[in-house]
Image (cartoon, rainbow, N blue to C red):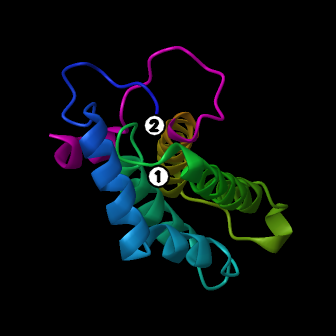
Amino acid sequence: MTETSDLSPFAHPKAQRYFATLLERSGFVAEVEEILQLDDDILELSHTRLLSAILLFIGRPGIWPDEQKRVLARAASRLSRQSKQIQESGNQPKKKRKPLTLSQHQRLSELEETIKVELELLRRRAGVSNRVSKIAQPESWGKLWS
């Protein structure tokens, strides 16, 4: 396990072993791996974001085993790929799509910004981000984090 704050309830080695055993026995990590292998037409962006949110909550140091961080990285990769598809759909030639209304454009922009934050948080949990600046939680998650 990685280092955690001395004040963290997860810093104790017994707690870390407990969480590692719990995740192993429950089969949660294996289930997440199977879900991430589903096709994009089955696992839509909204489902990937939900899975990413769950992984952010339990994928923290002291709970998520270091040897399973590849699962977090795979989830980040999936979220990144699906978010790029949204950006590309918004940039299609006008002949292929209806023009967006102002409110639709604003909503799409807000969604893209929220996903960028979620993606960076997940990458940091997975240990694949090289950014060191502080990042705030997505505004839309306010009720979940408090």
Residue at 44% x, 17% y is 134
Q: Is residue 89 above or below residue 131?
A: below
Q: Is residue 141 left or right of residue 97?
A: left
Q: What amino acid is found at the position of numbered circle 2 in the picture?
A: Met
Q: Is residue 8 above or below residue 19?
A: above
Decide whether residue 133 is among the magenta residues.
yes
Q: Is residue 87 above or below residue 95?
A: above
Find disc 2 in the rendering and name its residue. Answer: 1
Residue at 51% x, 57% y is 104
Secondary structure beneath disc 1? helix
Total number of numbered labels? 2
Find disc 1 in the rendering and name its residue. Answer: 107
Q: Nearer the viewer, mark 2 or mark 1?
A: 2
Crowding near pointer 1: few (<14 within 10 Å), some, many (20+)? few
Residue at 36% x, 61% y is 21
Decide whether residue 137 is among the magenta residues.
yes
In this picture, which residue range is highlighted in magenta? 125-146
Q: What amino acid is found at the position of numbered circle 1 in the picture?
A: Arg
Mark closer to the chain start, 2 or 1 = 2
Residue sticking out furthest to the left: 146
Secondary structure beneath disc 2? loop
Crowding near pointer 2: few (<14 within 10 Å), some, many (20+)? some
- The location of residue 69, given as percent across then percent down, is 57, 48
Q: Distance from label 2 to label 1 (Cα)?
A: 39 Å
